[in-house]
Image (cartoon, rainbow, N blue to C red):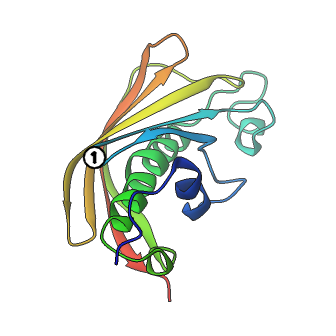
């Protein structure tokens, strides 16, 4: 029997990324087609010290990681749980495997972003999603089409 629909809190609890490499504060909504999450890039994040001293900017690779943690990993967990028991869901990890991305503006320390993902493809533990990141004022920050693959931990 499947775990059934997970709550946003349950999805966060199953997310394999942990601080200081978790870039998701909350899941706002999720269903079989879409997911939305939020993250605040705190001023004391470890990567700002060197990127760039005196004028920090969030690295694009970190923005992409945040987008994939919501739009691929968290959505993948939700979809996986619709098909499998919860104890089995916890033994799998969704690994990000590829992306085609475009960045429109920088994200500075202290900014909060909203990430929205939409499922394009889900079959045999592989998810492809269109993911967008928005600034607090609704401005599009970045977009990507990314894929993830579910792999067994143990």
Q: How crowded is mark 1: few (under 14 residues within 10 Å), some or many (20 or more)?
A: many
Number of numbered markers: 1
Task: Identify which residue is drawn at 55% across, 16% down.
Answer: 136
Task: Identify which residue is drawn at 52% across, 10% down.
Answer: 137
Q: In this view, does 149 lie to the left or right of 12?
A: left
Nearest the eye: 27 or 120: 27
Residue 154 percent coordinates (x, y)? 50, 89
Figure quadrant of the N terminus: bottom left
Residue placed furthest toward the top: 137
Residue 67 percent coordinates (x, y)? 45, 41
Residue placed furthest toward the front: 1
Q: Please determine whether, in this image, residue 1 is positioned above or below residue 71.
A: below
Label 1 secondary element? strand
Nearest the eye: 77 or 47: 77
Q: Mark 1 = which residue?
A: 129
Task: Identify which residue is drawn at 63% across, 51% down.
Answer: 22
Residue 62 percent coordinates (x, y)? 55, 43
Q: Please determine whether, in this image, residue 41 is positioned above or below residue 27.
A: above
């Amino acid at each position: 029997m499947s775990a059934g629909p997970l709550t946003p809190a349950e999805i966060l609890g199953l997310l394999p990324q942990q601080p200081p490499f978790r870039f998701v504060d909350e899941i706002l909504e999720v269903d079989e087609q879409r997911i939305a999450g939020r993250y605040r890039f705190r001023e004391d994040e470890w990567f700002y010290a060197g990127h760039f001293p005196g004028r920090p900017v969030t690295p694009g690779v970190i923005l992409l990681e945040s987008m994939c943690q919501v739009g691929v990993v968290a959505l993948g967990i939700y979809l996986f749980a619709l098909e499998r028991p919860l104890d089995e869901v916890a033994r799998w990890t969704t690994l990000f495997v590829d992306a085609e991305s475009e960045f429109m503006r920088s994200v500075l320390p202290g900014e909060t972003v909203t990430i929205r993902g939409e499922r394009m493809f889900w079959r045999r533990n592989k998810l492809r999603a269109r993911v967008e990141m928005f600034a607090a004022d609704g401005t599009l920050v970045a977009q990507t089409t990314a894929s993830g693959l579910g792999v067994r931990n143990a």
